[in-house]
Image: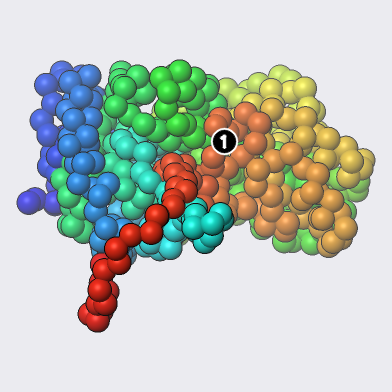
């Protein structure tokens, strides 16, 4: 079978659905252009799936579920072990695809694959992770035990900014728990989804256990409304997360929907300002700010603001911007021309609202480039009522609010509608402990700017950053993709079998 890697230099290639273990030709006459965000040029086109395509994927998943859900857990784990090996083999090629379609610099792209690979490694331990509990003799001759069993057909709807990592947060656990899985990636960066399909097939996954549907709201709604789908996972903006949660819940599905963010970094006066400045450069401007865990709001407590600016502003001016395939660049382009204009409009708005613009990314230009580049931007003296502070911009724009006390800083974070991630930089253990205990945010960093948990913990925010009761991966992921069954049993006295001397095996 010809690999998708063999056609990456063909700008006329078409990205199709993957159903029942192979590329599937759609009858759709709708397609979207996939662009190289560093050049503005077409690098592929993606076919927008129809309801018939969705139905075909559902039926393929349903058929495969009958045997896959009964496959011994050790065999399911071995598919994950092989997938891990194949991802490590092809990591650099996959990173190049991410850089081409999204714009991340290569190091960042490869790092995102590594963070997804960690979830595959976690899923390799699924025989241990889904073990139930047992109590002997809860009554006279009565035992009680529990087991975790698969849900059925699961769906993942993933964003453009992490086309490799976020799907890896979902399907390895879903599949290793015995479910089948349908992935609907962003149409802006669709190629990685088909790569996962190819690698899973090479790893020995039976046809139909993993299917890929491409497209927009038509495909999404068809999946969410379908009676055969048992669970839906989503990562993206809050308005869409709300829609996914509401629609899927109304149709009786289990849902985890991760929405938007406005992540704060609180700077105490005793913090190491060199360390804070370095942290903000990476957390605020890495991946051009297109991260749900990016720091986008700095809260400077007491007299910390001016010493921080003294360290931070020179560092911002050293950020090198350009195509992600040039390893000397620190920051690549935004995903589309439309998104670049949206981020620029927020910079315009910040000026109108009265924030002090210290670094203006709109003036940044790369000669002879039609790519979607925008330089780093920094606002000082923003207030809690300004839209540039309240709303998620999803670009390389940092805002700073100055407050007098620690309590004011905590109140600002807790009053915000989003509660995805936050961090505090301080040398004061008491302040750090009080912050971590009292802050109303799902993921907290102490002198760590981007506190994304490792795969054996769980990723998820609070408030309007998460809809549903479960975050992704870790043990919360295992619980999400399984349902608990508890059995209480009693056996009356009967004829006992004779002795057996052979080694018991599976």
Q: Nearer the viewer, residue 501 or 298?
A: 501
Where is 473 relative to 248, above or below? below
Expressed as whole percent of the image width and height from the top left, the position of residue 15 reads 19, 36
Q: Quadrant of residue 481?
A: top left
Expressed as whole percent of the image width and height from the top left, the position of residue 456 reads 52, 58
Q: Nearer the viewer, residue 224 or 376?
A: 224
**Image point 28% across, 41% down: which residue?**
180
Q: Nearer the viewer, residue 416 or 286?
A: 416
Expressed as whole percent of the image width and height from the top left, the position of residue 326 reads 39, 56
* Left or right placement of residue 425 versus residue 154 in this view: right
* Left or right placement of residue 36 versus residue 141 in this view: left
Query: Disc 1 designates what residue?
Result: 469
Q: Is residue 44 visible?
A: no
**Image point 45% across, 31% down: which residue?**
254
* Left or right placement of residue 296 versus residue 162 in this view: right
Q: Nearer the viewer, residue 115 or 355?
A: 115
Expressed as whole percent of the image width and height from the top left, the position of residue 102 reads 38, 41
Q: Is residue 414 visible?
A: yes
> In which quadrant is the C terminus drawn?
bottom left
**Image point 27% across, 46% down: which residue?**
69
Q: Residue furthest left?
A: 1
Q: Residue furthest bottom?
A: 501
**Image point 74% across, 23% down: which residue?**
386
């Amino acid at each position: 079978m010809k690999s998708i890697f063999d056609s990456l230099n063909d700008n006329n290639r078409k990205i199709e659905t993957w159903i029942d273990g192979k590329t599937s030709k759609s009858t759709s006459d709708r397609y979207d252009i996939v662009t190289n965000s560093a050049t503005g040029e077409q690098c592929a086109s993606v076919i927008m799936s129809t309801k018939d395509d969705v139905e075909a994927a559902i039926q393929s998943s349903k058929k495969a579920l009958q045997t896959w859900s009964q496959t011994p857990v050790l065999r399911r784990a071995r598919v994950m072990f092989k997938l891990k090996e194949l991802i490590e083999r092809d990591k650099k090629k996959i990173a190049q695809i991410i850089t081409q379609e999204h714009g991340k610099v290569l190091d960042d792209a490869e790092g995102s694959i590594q963070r997804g690979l960690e979830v595959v490694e976690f899923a390799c331990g699924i025989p241990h992770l889904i073990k139930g509990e047992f109590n002997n003799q809860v009554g006279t001759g009565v035992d009680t035990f529990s087991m975790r069993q698969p849900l059925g057909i699961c769906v993942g709807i993933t964003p453009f900014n992490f086309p490799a990592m976020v799907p890896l947060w979902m399907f390895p656990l879903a599949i290793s728990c015995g479910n089948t899985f349908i992935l609907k990636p962003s149409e802006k960066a669709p190629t990685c989804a088909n790569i996962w399909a190819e690698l899973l097939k090479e790893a020995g996954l039976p046809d139909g256990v993993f299917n890929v549907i491409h497209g927009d709201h038509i495909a999404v709604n068809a999946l969410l409304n379908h009676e055969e789908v048992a669970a839906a996972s989503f990562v993206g903006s809050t308005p869409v997360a709300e829609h996914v949660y509401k629609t899927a819940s109304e149709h009786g599905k289990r849902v985890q929907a991760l929405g938007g963010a406005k992540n704060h970094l609180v700077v105490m006066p005793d913090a190491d300002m060199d360390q804070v400045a370095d942290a903000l450069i990476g957390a605020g401007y890495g991946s051009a700010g297109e991260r749900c865990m990016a720091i986008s709001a700095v809260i400077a407590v007491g007299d910390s603001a001016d010493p921080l600016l003294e360290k931070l502003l020179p560092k911002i001016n050293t950020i090198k911007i350009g195509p992600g395939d040039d390893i000397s660049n620190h920051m690549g382009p935004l995903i589309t021309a439309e998104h670049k204009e949206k981020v620029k409009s927020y910079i315009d708005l910040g000026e109108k609202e009265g924030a002090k613009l210290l670094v203006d990314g709109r003036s940044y230009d790369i000669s002879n480039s039609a790519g979607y580049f925008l330089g780093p931007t920094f606002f000082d003296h923003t207030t809690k009522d300004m839209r540039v502070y309240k709303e998620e911009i999803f670009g390389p724009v940092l805002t700073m609010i100055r407050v007098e006390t620690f309590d004011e800083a905590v109140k600002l974070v807790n009053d915000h509608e989003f509660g995805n991630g936050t961090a505090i930089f301080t040398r004061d253990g008491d302040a750090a402990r009080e912050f971590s205990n009292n802050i109303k945010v799902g993921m907290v960093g102490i002198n760590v700017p981007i506190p994304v948990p490792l795969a054996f913990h769980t990723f998820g925010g609070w408030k309007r950053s998460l809809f549903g009761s479960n975050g992704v991966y870790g043990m919360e992921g295992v619980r999400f993709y399984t349902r608990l069954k508890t059995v209480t049993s009693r056996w009356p006295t009967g004829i006992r079998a004779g002795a057996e001397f052979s080694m018991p095996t599976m």
